[in-house]
Image (spheres, helix red, strand yellow):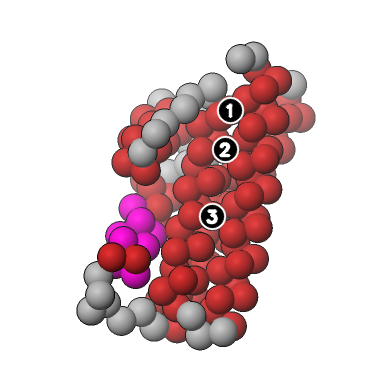
Amino acid sequence: MDKEYYRDLAHVRLKNAEDLLKDARELLERDSYKSANNRAYYAIEKSVKALLAMKQTEVTTHNGGLKQFNYLYIYKGDGTFTTEDYQKIVKAEQIRNFSDYDDFYIANKEEARQQIENAEYIVRKVSAYMEKLKQED
């Protein structure tokens, strides 16, 4: 697969992230907090996978995606993405895991709202970064 394929894949993944964010907002409005947490996390996960596609990198697990993001965009990156960004992603994954798998976990509106805000921040940052790379080509 060539560079063009991965660029297209990155844009498809980013569009999917935007759609997931829309879903998260709608779920929050319907007081479906656990589901909103899930969709917000997956918006972040799709954004991270869009970035990885820009480096022609594929992963098969959430943990693998986080590790590659940390390595390629924070450790070896240009400073655009920070350890604070990484921590937001890690926290989103933790809350998504609680929301999806802990039967006794009680999600609340403020937490879901914060999850969505963090997802919006990451998606916007990824989008701006990808746009910058496009202009540099």
On the image, which quarter does residue 132 sit in? top right
Residue 54 image label:
1
In the figure, residue 109 lies in which quadrant? bottom left
Q: Which residue is mark 3?
A: 43
Circle 1 — which element? helix
Q: How far apart, in angstroms, are the residues tagged by discs 1 and 2? A: 7 Å
Tell me which numbered mark, 3 or 1, is placed earlier along the sequence: 3
Looking at the rendered structure, the kind of residue marked 2 is Ala
| Residue sitting at x 56%, y 84% | 30
Q: Counting other residues with Cα less than 10 Å from the Cα at mark 1, is it few (<14), some (14-19), or many (20 or more)?
A: many
Contact? badges 1 and 2 (CB < 8 Å) = yes
In the image, residue 43 above or below residue 113: above
Circle 2: element type: helix
- Percent coordinates x, y for residue 32 in the rendering: 48, 80
Residue 94 appears left or right of 46? left
Q: Nearer the viewer, residue 5 or 72?
A: 5
Q: Earlier in the sequence, mark 2 or mark 3?
A: 3
Q: Give the residue type that dot 3 points to.
A: Ala
The magenta stretch spans which residues? 90-99
Q: Is residue 103 visible?
A: yes
Residue at 51 percent across and 63 percent down: it is 39
Dot 3: few (<14), some (14–19), or many (≥20) neighbours within 10 Å? many
Characterize the magenta stretch by its predominant secondary structure: helix
Q: For mark 2, does the 10 Å Cα neighbourhood hold few (<14), some (14 to 19), or many (20 or more) residues? A: many
- Which label is found at residue 50? 2
Quadrant for the C terminus, please: top right
- The image shows residue 25 at horizontal and vertical percentages of 60, 73
- Residue 98 shown in magenta: yes
Location of residue 60 with respect to 119 vertically, above or below: above
Q: Quadrant of the N terminus?
A: top right
SS assignment at label 3: helix
